[in-house]
Image (spheres, helix red, strand yellow):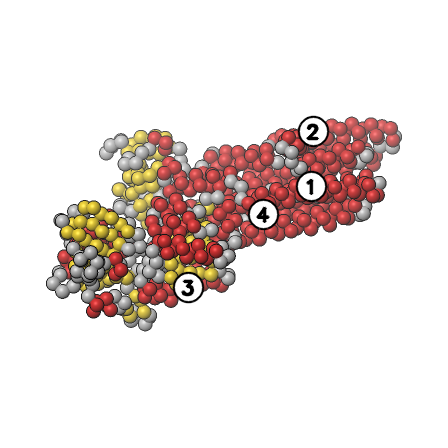
Amino acid sequence: MTEHVQTAHSAAAHSTASGDVDSSFSVSALFRRIERADLFRVAAVLVLTVTVSIIQLAVANPTWAMRLTVSCTVIGLVIGCWPIVKESWEDLRARKMSMDLSMLIAIVAAATIGQWLTSLVIVVFVLLAEILEDLCMWQGKDALSDLMSFLPDQVRLRIDESKIRNVPLSQIHPGQVIVVAPGGRIPVDGTVIAGASDVDESRITGESMPVYRDVGTAVYSGSVNQDGALEIEVSQVGEDSSYGRIVRALADAQSSSAPVQRLADTLATALVLIAVVGAVATWFLTGDLRSAISVIIVAGSCGVVAGTPLAMLASMARAARRGAFVKDGLHMESLSKVDTVIFDKTGTLTSGAPEVTRVIAAAGIDGSELLSVAASAESYSEHPLGKAIVRYAAAHDVRTHAVERFESIAGRGVRCMIEGTAIVVGTRSFMPHSGEAGIDGAAPEADVRHATARSVDTRTGSLDAESSVYVSRNGRYMGRIMLADEPHEHAAGAVAELRRRGVRVMMLTGDRKEVAVAVAGRLGIQQVHAELLPEDKASLVKQERAAGHRVAMVGDGVNDAPVLALADVGIAMGSGTDIARESADVILISSDINDVTSLLFTARRARGVIIFNFVGTVVVDLLGMVLAAFGILTPLLSAMVHVGSESAFILNSARLIPGREKRFNHPRK
């Protein structure tokens, strides 16, 4: 069956490469996917099967009837059994008992005892079942293949002010400028430098409505330009682009084998061996070779062998359609067992774009001076709070200074030298304290009490804690800057849905406890751990796993990378840092918290389908073998049960395959 699956995959890739990405499902499209040799083989064996049945009913002369029946059967078996013989030989060389080998034994045995029509019917059923399996696998692989062949081969490169040339995408480099016409596919990550348009980013973010992009905004490869021409300065292209990394991860995922797939192969081998042993026992005890053959025929394990990878591929494709890209089938399986989701706060549950609310300078320090020092020190920082301070200073035309010996300490803050003075910017505990190495000027006690100040939202009456960033110069406290970070719009709903489904939800943060508790209260999270360093977060995740919980960690920052790697499944927000995305097992390109819930439940649904197929296959096979051993199931009925159950389980997995969508233009309102 491996050959058939590879052929189906090649056909899928060929179709998508030729531009049939958005075509809707049709019967004619399915027939085009089937190899002509397979169609001929099935048609020929089917005609010969009908011929044999007519001969047995219509030809009165027993001698001629037997000669014609044997001749047609031999021809049919030679034509129809070739792929089965080929697969069986490969299995024998690999010292593996497979369903193809067991069915070949049954076909030969049926013909040997004179069950000519039965042997041909079995061949027809087996060939049809393998075609059905190929078509379902093609549908699953094609849902990923259309992602892989989506980008155009040629792009329009601006040479100078008046000249544009079509060049291969492979020749584009960062820094060049490309032109994307209305309706064109955006092949690179970059920044719009001219033009404005609505852009369909649904393939990347899962957002169904187009997003307006104009000069200065970022665009991503895999998006579709809609109603205006765009000139884009290239920042990333090919495998380095966001879409390229996704495609590479999905390509790796297709070739990987999850543990549940190895379990399916083991179960299939066990069922075949049980069927062979049962057939020998039936023959030995009853002497009825016909019943013994029926025992072998009725056992079918292709429902789990083919249905399991199909369910995994289909679930990964369904997740990818929503902008959640799982790097390996192993991670999809792990997601299905997760019972605890741990969120980082900043940039994950909150917008990650905090804004400065107050600048509180110490006595004798000017507010502009405090802001200037803080913005200068944070100019190299990747932390959202640091970036917010830099933005605020720039918006208020506050001058910054050159920085030397910059050092970032995860979970604490930054240190640097500015014009010969030692600057420390970060948490309260990171500030120099009097008596430590002779440094004076710790934050005054009166100001520390205000560090837990809360501001009341007059519209809702809810308490919202602010984050504080402290600043010291040469060991002397200069003041603090207060910032607020609003929760994501859908975060509370996502948390509620997770809890409704029985998933434990926790929040980890390096922020102060007051801030963490306030945010958690608004989101309905009861388990909160605050003021944590990266090593503290890692220790907590280890504790949860040691307690027997299956943990998914969701984060976006540099300091989240080690924790993402430690969790059973690490989930990185697409808006996060490169190192977080590299460390994670799953990337949420949309950065939408709701996608965490949909991803988790897609994985659970796939696991439920696989378990149903496992249990159903075992029950049908064992019951069928018992009925066949007692002579209740004839070889023909056994073949029908075999193919019927196998097809039902494969189609059950195929239910996970996402429907193929047409893209529509949505004018900007």
Query: Which tag, 2 or 3, sits closer to the chain's start?
Result: 2
Dot 1 corresponds to which residue? 272
Answer whether labels 4 and 3 touch (C-beta < 8 Å).
Answer: no
- Position above or below: 223 against 604: above
- Expressed as whole percent of the image width and height from the top left, the position of residue 662 reads 47, 45
- Expressed as whole percent of the image width and height from the top left, the position of residue 216 reads 26, 46
Disc assigned to residue 653: 4
Disc assigned to residue 69: none
Amino acid tagged 1: Val
Name which residue lies at 50% across and 50% down: 334
Answer whether labels 3 and 1 touch (C-beta < 8 Å).
Answer: no
- Image quarter of the N terminus: top right
Q: Secondary structure at mark 1?
A: helix
Dot 2 corresponds to which residue? 79
Dot 3 corresponds to which residue? 527
- Position above or below: 555 against 364: above
Name which residue lies at 39% across and 44% down: 582
Q: Residues within 10 Å of mark 3 (few under 14, many from 20)?
A: few
Q: Residues within 10 Å of mark 1 (few under 14, many from 20)?
A: many
Q: Residues within 10 Å of mark 2 (few under 14, many from 20)?
A: some
